[in-house]
Amino acid sequence: MENLLSSANPADPSTASSRRMVALAAEINPGERRVVQVDGREIGIFNLEGTFYALLNYCPHRGGPLCHGRVRPLVTAQSIGDLTHEREGEILKCPWHQWEFDIKTGRALYDPRLRVKAYRVAQEGDEVVIYV
Ligand code: FES
């Protein structure tokens, strides 16, 4: 007989990792971020229009404090001088050597094969929680 009290599901990432409350949702408004300490790691929590994202504060290039970098739009060009700004506030620029990363995925714009570690994060009630 199946034990209905055992809800561990290996397909559910929340059961395979540890849940940590990192902030109250009201403490990180849309467009803001907070860098928190979780089990000895620094993790940046970003609020993009009400949705939270979490990235390790360690640039995969040379270990810079990525989550303290400037947040920018994605800038593309159809031709020389014809710049377009889109996805305002979704691109994170490392303060050391200016590599840029997509906050939503952790992928580097320069080479999408490179990425900063991203964590599952969610708002649960009034709390922001991450799974590490
Ligand atoms: S350490 Fe981040 S771009 Fe070099």
Image (spheres, rainbow, N blue to C red):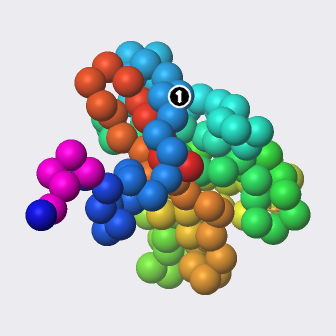
- Give the image location of residue 22, x and y in percent: 53, 28
Asked if ligand 1 lies within 8 A of label 1, the reply is no
Residue at the far front in the pictured view: 1
Which contiguous range is marked in magenta?
2-6
In front here: 14 or 42? 14
Q: Residue at x 76, y 58 (%)?
A: 59
User: Would you say 130 lies left or right of 65 here?
Assistant: left
Task: Using residue 7 as the reference point, say whether residue 15 is left or right of it.
Answer: right
Question: Residue visible at 38% across and 24% down?
Answer: 127
Q: Is residue 72 visible?
A: no
Q: Which residue is mark 1?
A: 22
- Above or below — where is 112 with respect to 69? below
Left-right relation of 41 to 45 = right
Image quarter hosting the N terminus: bottom left
SS at badge 1: strand
Residue 77 in the image, given as x and y percentages of width and height: 50, 74
In this rendering, the answer to whether 46 lies above or below 92 is above
- Residue at x-position 66% and y-position 36%: 38
Image quadrant of ligand 1?
Answer: bottom right
Hey, which residue is sitting farthest left in the picture? Answer: 1
Name the residue nearer the viewer: 81 or 112. 112
* Side of 101 where 2 appears, left or right: left
Give the main secondary structure, helix, strand or loop, of the magenta stretch.
loop
Asked if the stretch drawn in magenta spans residue 77, the answer is no
* Disc 1 residue crowd, few under 14, some 14–19, many 20+, Cα 10 Å: some
- Of residues 16 and 97, the one nearer the viewer is 16
Percent position (x, y) of residue 116? 65, 63
Determine if residue 96 is in view: yes
Type of the residue with mark 1: Val
Above or below 59: residue 124: above
